[in-house]
Amino acid sequence: MIDVHHPLATMLREKAVEGGRDPAPLLSITSLLGSLGEDERFVATTAHHLAAIYEQGAAGALDACLRGLAD
C-alpha cells in the first residue's frame, strides 16, 4: 500500500474503495478534479486503465500502456 500524504487522502481512499473498478466515485470529487469527471473521454480512458490495473496488476497495466504508446 502507498502511504498518501494529501489533505483529501481519507476521502480519496474511501471513494476508491467505494468505486472499485468504477472510477466514477473518485472522479466525482470536484474539489480535486473540477468538471473533469464529467468529460466522457477522460472517464472512459480512466475506466480503461483502471480495469487494466485490476486485470493485469500495476506493472502489467503500465507495460501494456507503454506498448500501446510505442505502436
Image: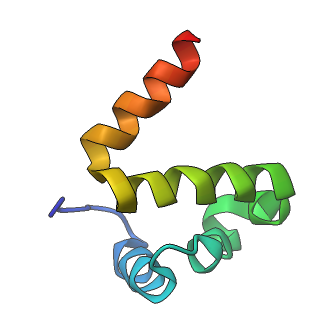
- Left or right position of 42 against 15: right
Residue lying farthest top? 70
Return the residue nearer the eye: 8 or 20.
20
Provide residue 55's location: percent of width, then percent of height: 37, 58
Provide residue 58's location: percent of width, then percent of height: 29, 47
Residue at 49%, 58% in the rendered image = 50
- Left or right position of 66 against 40: left
Residue at 35%, 72% in the rendered image = 9
Residue at 58%, 70% in the rendered image = 23
Return the residue nearer the eye: 14 or 32.
14
Q: Is residue 70 above or below residue 47?
A: above
Quadrant position of the C terminus in the picture: top right
- Left or right position of 2 against 47: left
Q: Is residue 64 above or below residue 36?
A: above
Quadrant position of the N terminus in the picture: bottom left
Colour scheme shown: rainbow
Exactly how many numbered labels are in the figure?
Answer: 0
- The answer to which image quadrant residue 61 occupies is top left
Return the residue nearer the eye: 16 or 44.
44
Provide residue 49's location: percent of width, then percent of height: 53, 50
- The answer to which image quadrant residue 13 occupies is bottom left
Residue at 56%, 73% in the rendered image = 26
- The answer to which image quadrant residue 64 occupies is top left
